[in-house]
Image (cartoon, helix red, strand yellow):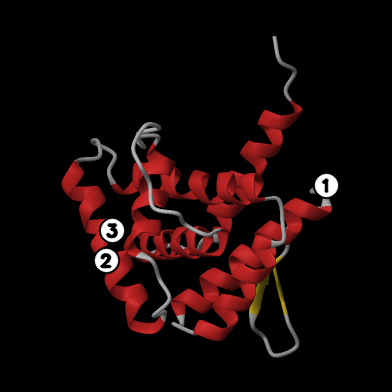
């Protein structure tokens, strides 16, 4: 569902039943992805700053859900190492063009984390939350562009999946 601003620009309208935090995550994520699409560093950094102030685990879970779904759709026959390498290279190359603060190690951490292949015993570089979130958003922006889709439906599904998982009773 979308609405229009007075200028005719399309904006996302989130489900009414979502609590405040998921709405804020969705809005800031959508803002960051729009800024990434237009390669606008200042609005991107502002959206990342909003996300840093929200519950980190929830924000990263939403972004990881989007990454997984997009990767699954882009590679329905299975994901190869070369496919992940291509996403990594595209995300870093395009991100560094307009976002010089991008940490390539953070992009690696986002991809391995979203795929569940990070080695818990491996020594990892210290990645600040804002670096990790920025990298995750750049990966999502890359995958959305590769899939040639708007991100809002993926964002809605990722938030809804977390909401569903949190409300299910544990056995």
Q: Are marks 1 and 3 in contact (CB under 8 Å)?
A: no
Q: Which residue is mark 3?
A: 88
Q: How many marks?
A: 3
The dot on residue 78 is none
Q: Which residue is mark 1?
A: 17
Asked which secondary structure carries label 1, the reply is loop
- Which residue sits furthest top? 171
Is 50 drawn above or below residue 23 in the view shown? below
Q: Residue at x 60, y 69 (%)?
A: 48
Q: Which residue is mark 2?
A: 90
Which of pointers 1 and 3 lies earlier in the amino acid sequence?
A: 1
Q: Is residue 15 visible?
A: no
Q: Is residue 126 visible?
A: yes
Which of pointers 1 and 2 lies earlier in the amino acid sequence?
A: 1
Q: Are marks 1 and 2 in contact (CB under 8 Å)?
A: no
> In the image, 19: left or right of 28?
right
Residue 49 at what x, y percent from top left? Answer: 65, 70
């Amino acid at each position: 569902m979308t609405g229009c601003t007075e200028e005719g620009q399309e904006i996302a309208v989130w489900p009414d039943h979502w609590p405040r935090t998921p709405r804020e995550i969705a809005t800031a994520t959508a803002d960051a992805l729009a800024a990434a699409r237009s390669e606008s560093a200042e609005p991107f950094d502002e959206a990342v700053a909003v996300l840093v102030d929200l519950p980190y685990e929830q924000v990263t879970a939403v972004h990881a859900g989007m990454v997984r779904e997009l990767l699954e759709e882009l590679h329905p026959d299975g994901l190869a190492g070369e496919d992940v390498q291509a996403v990594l290279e595209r995300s870093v190359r395009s991100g560094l063009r307009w976002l010089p603060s991008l940490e390539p190690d953070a992009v690696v951490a986002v991809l391995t984390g979203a795929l569940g292949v990070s080695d818990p015993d491996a020594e990892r570089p210290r990645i600040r939350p804002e670096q990790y979130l920025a990298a995750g958003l750049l990966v999502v922006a890359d995958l959305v562009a590769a899939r040639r889709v708007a991100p809002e439906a993926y964002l809605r599904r990722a938030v809804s999946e977390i909401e569903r998982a949190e409300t299910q009773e544990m056995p």
